[in-house]
Image: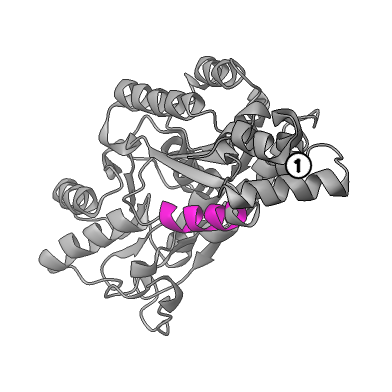
């Protein structure tokens, strides 16, 4: 295989001149340029883009670190990130921490390990989803920022959670507000004994949704009952088991707020097995508005999270940092709004609205 020195010899110029011509880094006269191009073509030589980018301390690659890629939430975000990256001629490396499958310490260890992997691959920027709890986030995020600055200044952008108070660009959803809207809807539907099925307790987004749940109960003078909270891990089977436990403890439950749609669908299955009518006996609402929520029977009321829009926004923020070489003085803060979607699990005669675009 011909190398740059072979091209230089055939063209009668130096290797540095060949590099300037093929990489278009400096002006070279049209006559010399043509000689180099003819020599390169005759030897079937092409410049190595990896070597070129490493010289510029760029790899034209970004990293994306998710918490549970096998779920129904992240694929649509990643699809949008890919779209932006491809338009900018960047490659994308996907890593997954499987955060919901470990305790807090194990989840963070795995997340940090994946972060290190992306840094070792010399990516030009990282979009990350963290499972760190509020109590540990300051120290942990300082470690991430230090790691991202260890070799070259790599911009990092948080997805889902707002870390701007720690100096990290963030594209996030307000989980507390979303939970308040969900519980408000159950109250508006006449529910007074409202249970909550959560995700893993150590995750901050879980804490936000519990906070929103409690806020609405307090606003309406509904006593908070700890036994009406049952934890899951965002899978349908955990929602199924949690719903069975809740109903065993309190058969007066008339409303259930689930931390995501997959757990809500598991809860629907459990209630149907118990002979409980939805929404006549118990009204149930989820969170995220993944496509199966529109086709399950009864169809699931939920909080719509615009995943594709979030993917586009977070990618645009990252590339803004990359292109401006991190010269923006303040952390970028973008909140992605959510909205209530009412279906048959809370209001019986709601028309069908199948989400066909995500099949």
Where is residue 188 drawn, in percent x and y? 48, 65
Does dot 1 land on a helix, a strand or a loop? Answer: helix
Q: Is residue 148 visible?
A: yes
Q: Residue at x 56, y 40 (%)?
A: 61
In this picture, residue 56 sits left or right of residue 299: right
What quarter of the picture does the C terminus occupy? Answer: bottom left
In this picture, residue 300 sits left or right of residue 217: left
Tag 1 residue: 21
The answer to whether residue 82 is magenta is yes
Q: Is residue 321 visible?
A: no
Q: Residue at x 53, y 21 (%)?
A: 144
Where is residue 57 drawn, in percent x and y? 65, 27
Q: Residue at x 50, y 48 (%)?
A: 216
Where is residue 85 drawn, in percent x and y? 59, 51
Category of crowding for the residue at label 1, using alpha-carbon neighbours closer than 10 angstroms: few (below 14), some (14–19), many (at least 20)? many
Query: Where 61 falls versus 117 (above or below)?
Result: below
The residue segment tinted magenta is 74-85
Relative to the observer, which residue lies in front, 359 or 204?
A: 359
In this picture, residue 338 sits left or right of residue 300: right
Total marks in image: 1
Relative to the observer, which residue lies in front, 59 or 150?
A: 59
């Amino acid at each position: 295989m011909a190398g740059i020195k072979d091209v230089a010899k055939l063209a009668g110029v130096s290797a540095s001149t060949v590099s300037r011509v093929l990489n278009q880094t400096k002006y070279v006269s049209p006559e010399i340029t043509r000689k180099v191009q003819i020599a390169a073509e005759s030897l079937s030589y092409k410049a190595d883009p990896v070597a070129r980018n490493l010289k510029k301390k760029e790899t034209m690659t970004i990293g994306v670190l998710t918490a549970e890629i096998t779920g129904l939430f992240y694929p649509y975000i990643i699809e949008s990130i890919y779209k932006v990256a491809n338009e900018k001629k960047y490659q994308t490396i996907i890593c997954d921490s499987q955060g919901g499958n470990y305790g807090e310490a194990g989840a963070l260890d795995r997340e940090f390990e994946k972060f290190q992997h992306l840094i070792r691959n010399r990516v030009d920027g990282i979009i990350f989803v963290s499972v760190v709890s509020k109590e540990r986030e300051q120290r942990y995020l300082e470690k991430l920022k230090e790691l991202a600055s260890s070799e070259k200044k790599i911009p990092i952008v948080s997805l889902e959670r707002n870390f701007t108070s720690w100096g990290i660009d963030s594209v996030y959803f307000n989980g507390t507000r979303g939970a308040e809207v969900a519980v408000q809807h159950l109250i508006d539907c006449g529910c007074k004994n409202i249970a909550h099925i959560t995700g893993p307790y150590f995750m901050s987004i879980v804490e936000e949704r519990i906070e929103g749940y409690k806020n609405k109960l307090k606003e309406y003078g509904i006593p908070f009952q700890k036994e009406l909270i049952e934890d899951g891990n965002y899978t349908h089977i955990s929602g199924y088991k949690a719903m069975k436990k809740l109903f065993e403890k309190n058969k007066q439950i008339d409303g259930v707020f689930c931390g995501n749609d997959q757990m809500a669908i598991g809860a629907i299955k459990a209630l149907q097995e118990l002979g409980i009518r939805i929404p006549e006996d118990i009204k149930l609402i989820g969170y995220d508005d993944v496509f199966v929520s529109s086709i399950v029977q009864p169809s699931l009321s939920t909080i719509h999270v615009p995943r594709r829009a979030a993917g586009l926004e977070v990618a645009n923020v990252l590339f803004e940092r990359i292109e401006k070489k991190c010269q923006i003085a303040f952390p970028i803060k973008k909140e992605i709004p959510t909205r209530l979607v009412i279906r048959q699990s809370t209001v019986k005669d709601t028309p069908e609205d199948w989400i066909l675009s995500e099949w």
